[in-house]
Image (cartoon, rainbow, N blue to C red):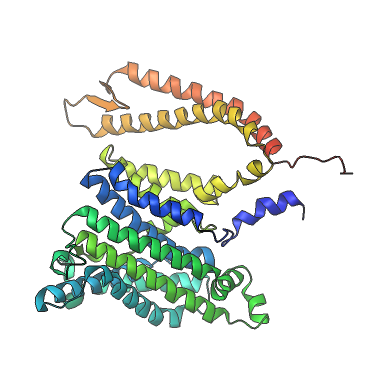
Amino acid sequence: MSDTAKTTASPQRAGAMSLTLGPWIVAALLLLVLPFIFDNNSSITIMNQMWITVIFALAYNMLLGQGGMLSFGHAVYMGMGGFLCMHVMNYVEDFGIALPLPVLPLFGGLFGMGFAMLIGAISTSGAGTRFAMISLGVGELVAACSVIIVAFFGGEEGISGDRTYGLPFFGIEFLKQIEVYYLISFWLMLSAALMYLFSRTPVGRMANAVRDNPERAQFLGYSSRWVRFYSFMASGFFCGIAGGLFAINYEILTEENLNTSSSGIILLVTFLGGVGFFFGPIIGAIAFTLLQTVLSLKTELWAFYAGALFLATVMYFPGGLAGLIMMHVPAFKFRNAGKLVMPYVKTLIPGLITVLGIAALVEMIFHYRHASVGDDEMTIFWTTFDSHSVVPWVIVTVITAIASYITKTTAPDLKEAWGDANTPPTTGGDA
């Protein structure tokens, strides 16, 4: 295999990151200063949700990305951990148990791991259709039980609690969102570090081998089933931690936290970020949370755009957003990244205008069809206009068509520049 092929292929394998402290220190410092940059409760609440989703996505990637196990019901383990934590939280309130709130996610993690142990005993013999269908069946079964076993799940209304009744932790009662933020950030760093270290252990590396070639792993003396089982248990543990943090942050859990819809969302998040990279789910969780929270405040069609982004990722960037980033590593290694700047400017700017133009047309169609009688005005990109007038439709259509034409015209030049940038420089000693 040539050096170019090796360089291009190596980032696509899980665990390709080197174990260095630099990225972790930068991440910790960033988590510390973010509340000062976005100094309001709504932003802190969004970041809390983001970090919980990051833990959940990383835990899911332990199955899908590292072990090759596609689960359609993995929200069950997060939900089970969250429900147990909520019960523990209520016991602390009812019986005055001296339990500090920061250790609560550990109970959720252990319960999630225990439940994963039960399910994994019957589901990890294979990683194909059988595993996927069992995970789907378990998800549906537990979701149905959530409205039947009222004592534990609370029925349709779920269960709620109050985190402030726990034992103060060094005088902190977690009355403010920023206090909860730093608690979640601590568990985020700890969980991410442990999951990364797990990926470097023999079990974690064998999970990659079992994913790629289970027959060869068996031939070398490793049990594919036990490797999957240990990975499944570890994933259940960190899912339970995410559930415990969800209980602390929102103080309520319902059937929605463990149904197949939540499982589908985490699958979307992980694929969007990139299952072949450890940091892929982190990018996916951040992107999806921003779509779900920030974009949903601007438009009712945020789910449509999220679905379109997911579809485009699967079709054109199967490595996810992380894979898209890592594709540029060879160009930087060969010191040819500068060759991509102008082609990117010429192609991506009109491409972005094309996407925004299509989105504007979608929003205009939606407003035209669903707005109440007499509500003719709408605002897109800080511009207010009459959606029933012909002029805005003509302007948006023309701009979108021109931008699309420019994108299509400059795309071959970008492709040529990409190939040139990813070609290693020749030396005088080469034949």
- Give the residue at the far right of this rendering: 431
* Residue 205 in sight in this render: yes
In the image, what residue occupies the spot 35% across and 66% down? 75
Near-viewer residue (52 or 136): 52
* Residue 60 in sight in this render: no
In the image, what residue occupies the spot 42% across and 59% down? 267
Q: Position of residue 58 (x, y in %)?
A: 43, 62
Q: Position of residue 374 (x, y in %)?
A: 16, 25
Image quarter of the N terminus: bottom right
Near-viewer residue (416 or 145): 416
Q: Position of residue 306 (x, y in %)?
A: 39, 45
In the image, what residue occupies the spot 67% across and 39% down? 335
Image quarter of the C terminus: top right
Near-viewer residue (128 or 234): 234
Q: Is residue 278 above or below residue 8?
A: below
Number of marks in the rendered image: 0
Q: Is residue 319 left or right of residue 352?
A: right
Q: Is residue 71 left or right of residue 169?
A: right
Q: Is residue 176 left or right of residue 407?
A: left
